[in-house]
Amino acid sequence: MLVDDNSVKHIVEAEKLLGTETHSLSHPEAWERAVTSVGKIPKSDNRYSFIIATDGFANSYPSEDEFLKTCMDYYSTIKVHGAEAVESNLKAWLNETSAMGSGDDITVLFAYNDGRDCGNDAN
């Protein structure tokens, strides 16, 4: 997911399988099913976040809208309170999300860009 102040967008769409069935990452040929996406990174003076998660995360919400709202909530929490606020609560939040949703394990990665110039001269 790519999240900024105005939107939440899918970067890679999950392969449509039967129900909540997925391909296992533990399968020896799992790499053959890997999907990548190449796109432009938002302007460096804008804040944004990438969220990468296992299917248990999205599958724990009753609707796509609820999932997208949650992605925006995580982005907003990091923006306003810092990554530490999410880090210190993440395990409990994900356990609750799974317990009230899919019951599946959840792994999630947040990459947040605060919009400050990193000193790179890109021409």
Image (tube, rainbow, N blue to C red):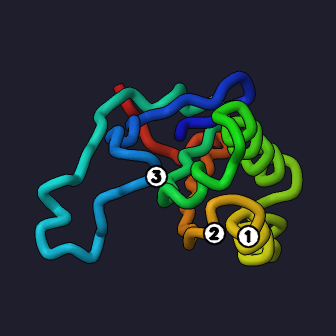
Q: Is residue 13 left or right of residue 110?
A: left
Check disc 3 and report the residue beneath it.
20
Work out which residue is located at the far front of the displayed protein and give it: 18
Query: Can you see residue 90?
Result: no
Question: Dot 3: what SS?
Answer: loop
The answer to the question of whether label 3 and label 2 lie on touching residues, with beta carbons closer than 8 A, is no
Q: Position of residue 117 (x, y in %)?
A: 59, 41
Residue 119, compared with residue 11, is above or below; it is: below
The answer to the question of whether label 2 and label 1 lie on touching residues, with beta carbons closer than 8 A, is yes
Residue 99 is marked as 1
Mark 2 nearby-residue class (10 Å; few <14, some 14–19, many ≥20)? some
Query: Can you see residue 66?
Result: yes
Check disc 2 and report the residue beneath it.
103
> Front-most of 85 and 28?
28
Work out which residue is located at the far right of the displayed protein and give it: 81
Alpha carbons under labels 3 and 2: distance apart: 12 Å
Task: Tell me which corner region of the image, top left, top right, bottom left or bottom right, holds residue 23.
Answer: bottom left
Mark 1 nearby-residue class (10 Å; few <14, some 14–19, many ≥20)? few
* Amino acid type at image mark 3: Thr
Question: Dot 2: what SS?
Answer: loop
Residue drawn at (63%, 69%) of the image: 103
Q: Position of residue 92 (x, y in %)?
A: 79, 76
Q: Position of residue 121 (x, y in %)?
A: 41, 36
